[in-house]
Structures are given as structure tokens and as C-alpha cells.
Amino acid sequence: MHVLFLMFTILVTSSASARERTTIAVVGIHQETITADAQNAAVIELADTIKKSKKFDALLPIDLTWLIQGREEVILQEAFSRTGRRFLDDGKTLYAQAQPEEAIPILEAAAEELTKTMSVTQAQALLWEALFTLGTAQLAVDASPEHAWTQAIVLNPDREPNSSQYPPDVIAQYQALQEQKLSQRGTLTIESSEPGVKVWVNGEPQGHTPLTLKNLPIGKAHVLGRTPQGFQSYQQVTVAADTSVTCSLAPSKGRWSLPASTTRTRVRLTSDLYRSLGAFAEVDLILVVGETAQNKASLQLYSPRMDAFSRPLDIATTGSITDELKNALPELLQLATEDGAILSMATTADAAALNPGTNTLLGRMMVSPTPVAAPPGGKIKWWHMALAGGGALAVGGVATGIILSTDTTEDPNQGTIIIGPIP
């Protein structure tokens, strides 16, 4: 009986180790002109090349969608608000240390950066905090907080300052301005170049275009529109008292990321994006590939566990970028071990200078994800294992062991093994 139990244990552990290869997530190519169909085909070809190495398994976008679903907005916020959050934390620290004069320019930088972030994701909570703290610091040096506080009030009319963090006189002055500013309202009509664009105003979902929103606070409104294809459009609109203002959105390709006009900005944004994705995706490695300049491309691996990128493998792309990337991929895979580590001599801190917004496949996953009800394709391995009735073995009873795996490629019985009864 004990021998049978030992054999069963060996069966479980050997099966797990045989089937648990390091996985590399393939999330598309950063390239301006590649079409959606070509992007999808490229992902399949790159994934097949990874699997042919016999060293790694590949995770397709549909698999990754299942892993991150419901957390897409958090990933975008983490990726694109990093600079603003750093300024905000520094400014709050200076204010808490009774250095309001030094805190003001830092908090102004935080508000500026987080305002940019509103163009791609819902960062209203962070922006409100930056604006309110900025106004409070200005009040401490006898400057007027009205401009910063008014923006905070319009951004979130219902939010109140935390009474455990700020003195009563500061809260009373904010509430008095809040009452004054919310006494007047305006109307905003939102149109779009194509109907049915999903709209957020100041971070709150409002419906689909065309739509008219009445009774909005007067002042600056952040309007963000998204299409099912992952395209976005953003505008800042000033809502005026007792007046109807019209805003027209034109969602377009590449707008799901912050602008990346310089090499330094592209490096920072791409690095932040993949770090954020890796933190929530729970995968071993992520393939980071795309165009860095005309007729030039780069391939890298990102390891969330190491928080490191492999050194870029730079290639010329005189022909098809997909073919060139596929041909170079085996060389890149040599920089990673079978357990998912990047060789220490081959690591670097940052991604190559890709333009995040040109990866339309990743953009669609982040901005307009398709809900996935169950792990697709059998690629999420060993997602559930249960052993029932182990105690019965000790007393000579009946034991039933159930092993469930979503990998059906190697198991004709759909990954289910039932053992028992055991006499």
C-alpha cells in the first residue's frame, strides 16, 4: 500500500516537472505600419519559433488576456503614472516635513505629469491628491489655493479631504470653495468620428457616443474615448456655466500610450509598461520586440522575477520585420536559462527605445479587452490539483487522487487522471 502511494507521488511530481516548461508571453510587435492581421500572424509565428526550441513554451495573447483580465486599467495606471507618482510622493513628504515652499514646485510637476496620464488611463485619484496637496502647500505660504483646489473639485466633486491628515481650518476652507464652485453647472455634448465610442469624463464611465451630459461642474473636464479596436482619443474641455459645450473625439491608432517623441522617453515608457505588465501577468518571461528606427529592430526578454531585461539584440529589417524577428529569435533565447532566468552577463536595466503605442495588439488587450471565461488553449498549466482521501490510505481505506491540468496537448484524456480505489 505504501509502495502504491509512493508510486502515485512519483507520478504526480514527475508529470508536473515534465510539463512545466518556462513560458514566454508573446504580446505583439511595436511597429507603426503593421496591420492587425499581420500582427496576429506574426504572434503565431514567433510563438511557434519559441516552442520549436524545445526549451520554452509560448503564451499567446489570448492566454495572457485570461491572466490579467480585470486588471488592465491597473496595469496602465502603474505603467504611465510612475513619474507623476514619484513627484507626488516627494511633494507630500516635503509638505509633511513642514517645507511647503520646497514642496510646491514638486507638486506642480506631479499635477502636470498626472494630467498627461489622464489622456491614457483613469488616474483621477492620484491627480486629485496632487492638486489638493498643492493647494494646501500654497495656503501654507499665504498663496491662493483656489486654482489648484478648483481643479480638484471639478475632477471629483464628491471627494472630501482626509480629516486625519489635514487640520480642520484647511478642510473648512476647501469645503467652502467646494460649495461655491458646485453651485454652477454646465452641459457637455460628446460626439465622435464613429458612433459607439465608450466615454469617460474625469475618470468616470458615461456611456457611448453620441451623448449629452448635463449638470456637470464648471471647469476643466478630461474626456477619454475608446473603441473596441483599442484606439483612443482624449481632450481637455472647459465646461462653462449655463452653457452647452461640444467635444468631438477622433480615436486613432497608437493613442493608447503616452507620446514618445524622444529616445529617452521611449526607453522609459517601454520599460515602465513591461515592468507593470510583468508584475500582474505572473509569467516567466515576456518577449519585447519591435522597431527602434527605420529599418532597425530590437529583440529582448523581460524577466519579472529578476526585474531585468536581456541586452537588446539589434537587427536590420530590410525585408519583412516578422521574418527578420523570427530568424533572430533563436539567438535571443540563448540568453535565458530553462528555469526562466536571464544570464547575468546578458542583463540590462531598461528596454530598447520602442514606441509603446505602436503595438496595437497589446493596446487592444489593455484598452478594449475581450472577456475570457476560462483558460484558453490549454496553455495555463497545473492551474488546479487536488488530492482527496489521503487520510484513508493510512487506515487501509479507499483513496481517490484527482489531478487537473488545462494542458490537453499531451494528454488525450483532457488532462484528467483518476486513480482509485486502492485496496
Image (cartoon, grey):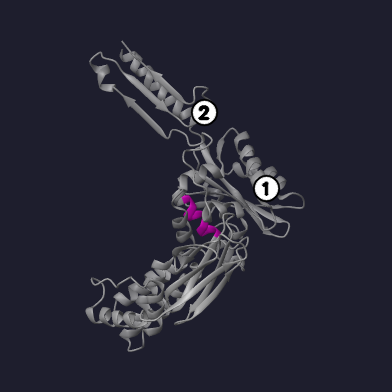
Residue type marked 2? Thr
Main SS, magenta residues: helix
Where's residue 124, x and y in %?
42, 68
In the drawing, does residue 282 fall left or right of residue 95? right
Q: Secondary structure at mark 1?
A: helix
Q: Residues within 10 Å of mark 2 (few under 14, many from 20)?
A: some
Quarter of the image containing the N terminus? Answer: top left
Q: Circle 1 sits on which residue?
A: 37
Q: Circle 2 sits on which residue?
A: 408
Q: Secondary structure at mark 2?
A: loop
Q: Is residue 347 above or below residue 189?
A: above
Q: Are marks 1 and 2 in contact (CB under 8 Å)?
A: no
Quarter of the image containing the C terminus? Answer: top left
Where's residue 110, x and y in %?
43, 73
Q: Is residue 50 above or below residue 308?
A: above
Q: Is residue 211 above or below residue 285?
A: below
Q: Earlier in the sequence, mark 1 or mark 2?
A: 1
Q: Is residue 276 magenta?
A: yes
Q: Which residues are magenta?
A: 270-278
Using the image as rendered, state which of residue 213 and residue 286 is in the foreground. Answer: 213
Residue type marked 1? Asp
Where's residue 214, x and y in %?
44, 73
Mark-to-mark CA distance, 1 and 2:
27 Å
Residue for point 34% across, 14% down: 421
Using the image as rendered, state which of residue 152 and residue 336 is in the foreground. Answer: 152
Using the image as rendered, state which of residue 60 and residue 261 is in the foreground. Answer: 60
Residue 140 in sight: yes
Where's residue 165, x and y in %?
26, 72
